[in-house]
Amino acid sequence: MKVKLTRGEMLAQWKQRMYLEPLRADCIVERSDGIDLDSYCEQEMRLWYLNLLASADTRYLSPTDLTLTAVVKRIDGNRGSITLPTGTIRPVRVRLSGWRRDAAIVTEISSGAGRRQLNPFGCGGVEEPVALWLGDGRLELFSLPTSEGTPLPEAVTAIVDHGDEVYEFDELAWELLPRQM
């Protein structure tokens, strides 16, 4: 089941799951010179969440469907480009009309699959399309299905960080929390 939490809700869940809550309320003496536990927890949970978005299996995440907002722009060499929204961590699925299957997503142009796309005889074509994630919000698409016109996106989904006020993932991801002893 997907969960969507505000920063305050996430902090409360984080503290409880990391065995920091509930605090005892039966004390007689209170101190005000202690560490700011919330600040430490917020930093730790934010780093955990960003790492989760960047590296976890998609079954633990809540991919965002960008199909209706994605616009393909034709660039030279029978290639296309899609600019994904700010906060996109990584694309998960890309498919254009005319392609026989989803594109293989490559993150390194220097990889074998990336280098083959620069050769018109070695690129994937519509049978094995390739999308190169440049990491700066741009997704370069190789082997557009036609040499004229611009194909429509049939599916574009990505893992998007909506900022530090929103935490969105599948509740299975709680099992990936670091264990404290």
Image (cartoon, rainbow, N blue to C red):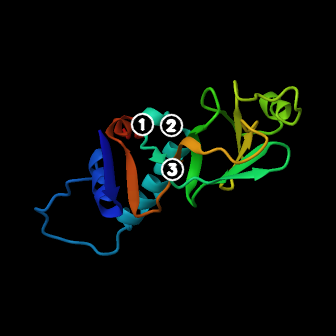
Distance, label 3 to label 1, CA atoms, is 19 Å
Residue at disc 1, secondary structure: helix
> Mark 1–mark 2 contact, CB under 8 Å?
yes
Residue at disc 2, secondary structure: loop
Write down the quadrant of residue 99 in the picture.
Answer: top right
Query: In this image, 10 relative to 97: left or right?
Result: left
Query: In this image, 34 relative to 163: left or right?
Result: left
Amino acid type at circle 1 is Tyr
Question: Can you give x and y, in whole percent of width and height, for residue 180 in the image?
Answer: 38, 41
Residue holding disc 3:
66
- Tell me which label, 3 or 1, sits earlier in the chain: 1
Distance, label 2 to label 3, CA atoms, is 20 Å
- Tell me which label, 2 or 3, sits earlier in the chain: 2
Give me the disc on residue 56: 2
Write down the quadrant of residue 22 in the picture.
Answer: bottom left
Distance, label 1 to label 2, CA atoms, is 7 Å
Amino acid type at circle 2 is Ala
Residue placed at 34% from the left, 74% from the top? Answer: 33
